Amino acid sequence: MISFDQILEEKIGSGIYQLRTVSIIGLIEFCDGVEYVFMSILMAILQKEWQLSQTQVATLGSSFLGGVVIGNCICAYITDKIGRKTSFSIFAGLSVILVYYTSFAESYNEIIILRLLFGIVFGTTSPLGYVFITEVAVAKYRGRFAFSLTLMYVAGKAYLVLLCFFFLDDYTSGNWRGLIRFNGIPVLLCFILSLIYLKETIRYYLNKGQYTVAFEEIEDVQKQNNSQYEPLNESEKDGLIAWQLRQNNLMIKENQNEESGVLSKQHLRITLQLWTLLILANFQNLSIYLLMPFLFAQENSGFEHMLYLFLIEFVFAFVIYLFIDDPKYGGRVNIIIYASILLVITNLLLYIYQASILFFGMLLIKIATRGMFSTLFIICCESYPLHLRSRGSGLAMAVGKVVSIPSPYVLFPLFAIDPYLPFLILSVLGTFMIALSITYPSDRTQKHLEVYSDVQKEE
């Protein structure tokens, strides 16, 4: 039986359509990278400028994380109802408003609310971007297309640090209002481009039963990718409709047997392992971003050290980009295993040798967490069928962030005892990540996206 993955590979292919989509989605990832680093630096600045207590600084970080959780949940349930493009454009527009409003905030309470709202935007657009890309890319290059979002994210972080040389004096003072206003330019550009050029995914139209629209979109995408395209014939259209109806019928059957959802018997093991991995990965990643400005400030390091970190992280992210679709040497699960091992070793060495290897240790941790996070996002999207994709990905990321919300209240007291004590705890937690990665049951590297397609072939 014909499937949309076959149509995508044989009739649509890869070209201008995918590149345009990746460029627009990548731009919001670029802005997310800017915002994530800005959040960590802003906490250090406001602690000094507004004389904030340790608890207030922790609350500032937690408010952003709380917003991310809410945003993940919005992605999990709303985007399947109103569509990927509509959701993306709405939250890109909200991001523009929040960027400029933050630059005029005068009170701690205002900043808390704005960090919460920005977290909601970040939490919605980040998983949605990966869902979007996995649905428009062919199986052979799906990992690379999705991982290109990571490259844009890291580029955004490096861009923010580069601007810090012009707007800030050091990690604790400077014109942070001017910095965030300047960062509003790429956010505004992304919003405008999404309104003009971003298109809803064809898989979404098929899943909604809007076959005429889906066929029109297929033909339009074919024109963009190849002027000498061969349009779908009636047999292929009928086969695609039959394929979609087959998936719908199997989904209805699951619902009747009360076996649907991310916690159904079919998906339970994958869901629980994904949730646990994301909880541990979030704690690791958040520890770095919360503590890095304070550690660098303590060692009197300038912005150049952070910039070097992000530039080298970009280079290594590009190396992962080259291997992520190679089932022999790379592949999704292998990358998670490699990253987990690197985290265990590096965290332990940082605890032992401390400031003497701070830069090198931070570099290795950032490389590992970047590979870990980006690959887990791709795995989330590939592990569920279309009707559960946004929900499964959004909930997995939300659960990972929920447990991380109180982490600032744990990390800063540990930091007060010994600035490197958190790394010992992270090393121990990394051993659990290794075990979960080795036993992960599904790797869809270069395999068709829709789970039901495999069921049909077996039947």
Image (cartoon, rainbow, N blue to C red):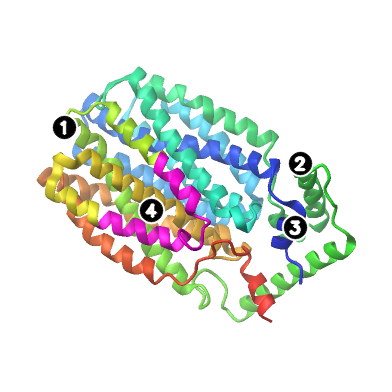
Which comes sooner in the sequence, label 3 or label 2? 3
Q: Look at the picture and state if 62 lies above or below 134.
A: above
Residue 20 drawn at (x, y percent):
65, 39
**Residues at marks 1 and 4, CA–CA distance in whole angstroms:** 30 Å
**Residues at marks 1 and 3, CA–CA distance in whole angstroms:** 56 Å
| Whether label 1 touches label 2, CB < 8 Å | no
Relative horizontal placement of residue 10, taking residue 137 as reference (left or right):
right
User: Can residue 78 be seen by looking at this rendering?
Assistant: no
The kind of secondary structure element at disc 2 is helix
Answer with the quarter of the image where residue 437 lies. bottom left
Residue 320 drawn at (x, y percent):
45, 49
Going by the numbered disc 1, the residue's amino acid type is: Glu
Secondary structure character of the magenta stretch overall: helix
Going by the numbered disc 4, the residue's amino acid type is: Lys
Name the residue located 21 percent from the left edge and 35 percent from the top edge: 294
Q: Which residue is mark 4?
A: 401
In the image, the segment drawn in magenta is 315-344
The kind of secondary structure element at disc 3 is helix
Front tag of 4 and 2:
2
**Residues at marks 4 and 3, CA–CA distance in whole angstroms:** 39 Å
Inspect the magenta stretch and tell me whether residue 326 lies in it.
yes
Q: Residue furthest left?
A: 417
The kind of secondary structure element at disc 1 is loop
Going by the numbered disc 2, the residue's amino acid type is: Gln
Q: Which residue is mark 1?
A: 299
Q: Which residue is mark 3?
A: 10
Q: Which residue is mark 2?
A: 224
| Whether label 4 touches label 3, CB < 8 Å | no
Residue 74 drawn at (x, y percent):
52, 52
Q: Look at the picture and state if 424 lies above or below 29.
A: below
Which comes sooner in the sequence, label 1 or label 3? 3
Name the residue located 22 percent from the left edge and 52 percent from the top edge: 347
